[in-house]
Image: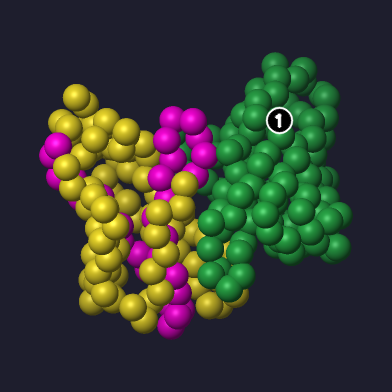
Chain colours: A green, B yellow
Amino acid sequence: GAVVSQHPSWVICKSGTSVKIECRSLDFQATTMFWYRQFPKQSLMLMATSNEGSKATYEQGVEKDKFLINHASLTLSTLTVTSAHPEDSSFYICSELTDPTDTQYFGPGTRLTVL
Amino acid sequence: AQKVTQAQTEISVVEKEDVTLDCVYETRDTTYYLFWYKQPPSGELVFLIRRNSFDEQNEISGRYSWNFQKSTSSFNFTITASQVVDSAVYFCALSGVNTGFQKLVFGTGTRLLVSP
């Protein structure tokens, strides 16, 4: 399967600051990547679909001005949590969609804690 | 609308026992994929299997086996002779043709605890 990395693996920040999370496809050119959020002991919730060279598509209820997504190259998508607050503390996971198997392979995740 | 139900929140077994994780799905898509992912304590989701809706053959991979039955909309996962390393949260997921197979809908997950 595809290999996806995320950086950082964990981050602690103060309320009001912005945090950038990187998602890299290491062995595949991913035109489409996805960002998920997972609260403790809950399932994964899709936040947005990241398309290379175009604007991301956000799921209903996800604030696009708060969660900025940039997919400037075929191997890198970034998620920036702007003006983070404690309720944004969560596990953020990215994935890439491989073609033609239509299978998503996931990164190791980033644990964000906002104090 | 698509929905995946994993009714078992948590299962505890003793090593070497067999265990089956249930997954029931709902979809109006005529073509869809079903998936199982494993999430160990480290957090990373590990892909286990993908099954096409047209392929109802059961699959076996080592100690893992999957039973896909369209008649009951189920895609159950059995681990034979469980081991402590199997302890993880297991997610069943679905993607359909109407979203270009791009949207994965996850179940709520089943936490499996295998004790020595």
Q: Residue type at mark 1?
A: Pro
Q: Is residue B7 magenta?
A: no
Residue at image coords 55%, 68%: A102
Name the element at disc 1.
Answer: loop
Tell me if residue A29 comes above or below residue A82 in the rendering.
below
Residue at image coords 45%, 74%: B32
Q: Quadrant of the C terminus of chain A?
A: top right
Residue B18, quarter of picture:
top left
Q: Nearer the viewer, residue A79 or A7?
A: A7
Chain part drawn in magenta: B16-45
Residue B76, quarter of picture:
bottom left
Count of numbered circles on the image: 1
Q: Nearer the viewer, residue B20 or A3?
A: A3
Q: Nearer the viewer, residue A75 or A38?
A: A75
Position in image of residue B84 (x %, y %): 27, 31
Position in image of residue A23 (x %, y %): 71, 44
Position in image of residue A73 (x %, y %): 84, 56
Q: Residues within 10 Å of mark 1 (few under 14, many from 20)?
A: some
Tell me if residue A111 comes above or below residue A53 in the rendering.
above
Tell me if residue B28 comes above or below residue B94 in the rendering.
below
Position in image of residue A67 (x %, y %): 77, 43
The residue pinned by badge 1 equals A8
Q: Is residue B39 magenta?
A: yes
Q: On the rendered structure, is B17 left or right of A2?
A: left
Tell me if residue B6 comes above or below residue A21 in the rendering.
below
Is residue A114 at least partly visible in the picture?
no
Question: Which subunit holds the residue at mark 1?
Answer: A
Q: On the rendered structure, is B44 left or right of B41?
A: right
Residue at image coords 61%, 49%: A3
Residue at image coords 34%, 56%: B5
